[in-house]
Image (tube, grey):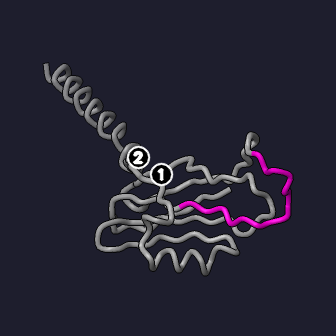
Amino acid sequence: MFRKLRKIILLVLAFFVAYSLAGCGKKGEEMKKDLDFTVCDVTRMPEELLDIIEEKKGNIFKLSYMNDDYMYIAIGYGEHSRQNLNVVVEDLYMTDNAIYVETNLITEENTSTDGQKGETSMYPYIVLKCEKYDLPVVFDID
C-alpha cells in the first residue's frame, strides 16, 4: 500500500513539475500591441516639430517628439532627385519596453513626373501621430 501511495505522489509531483516548466518559456516573451496612428501633414504638426524636420530633412533622420497631448514619430530619408518616392509604414507596435516602428521607402510606379526626372529634389519623410507613451522608440527603416 505504501508503494502505491508513493507512486501516486511521485506521479502528481512529476505532473506539477512538468506543468511548471512548460510555463517558463512564455515569461520571456513580450506582449505586442499594435498602435493606432494618424499620418500627419504639415498643417497638423506642432510648429516646433516642423522646424526640427525642416532643419534635418536633407539627411536621413529618425526622431520622436512629444507635446502635452500626443507622441509624434518622424522618419526622413534625406534628399533624393526622384519625384516618385513614398514612405510606407510596415509596422507600428508597442511592447513592455519600447515602441517599434518599421518603414520603407518605395518607388511609386504610376506617378507621373511630367518629364522632369532628376531636375528637382524631394525630401521624403513621414510623421506619425499616436497616443503619448513614456517609452523609447526603436526605428527600423529600409
Instruction: Tell me the quadrant of the picture where the C terminus can be found.
Output: bottom right
Residue stretch in magenta? 112-126
Label 1 sits on what residue type?
Leu
- Residue 84 point in image, percent of width and height: 74, 52
- Residue 26 point in image, percent of width and height: 38, 43
- Residue 109 point in image, percent of width and height: 76, 41
User: Badge 1: few (under 14), some or many (20 or more) residues near its Cα, within 10 Å?
Assistant: many
The foreground one among 14 and 130 is 130
Q: Secondary structure at mark 2?
A: strand
Instruction: Tell me the quadrant of the picture where the N terminus can be found.
Output: top left
Vertical comparison of 12 with 74: above or below: above
Q: CA distance from mark 1 to mark 2?
A: 6 Å
Residue 118, magenta (yes or no): yes
- In this view of the protein, can residue 2 be seen by the observer? yes
Vertical comparison of 1 with 135: above or below: above
Residue located at (62% from left, 66% from top): 76
**Residue 117 falls in image quadrant:** bottom right
Side (left or right) of 79 relative to 135: right
Q: Earlier in the sequence, mark 1 or mark 2?
A: 2
The foreground one among 104 and 123 is 123
Question: Label 1 belongs to which residue?
Answer: 92
Residue located at (60% from left, 54% from top): 103
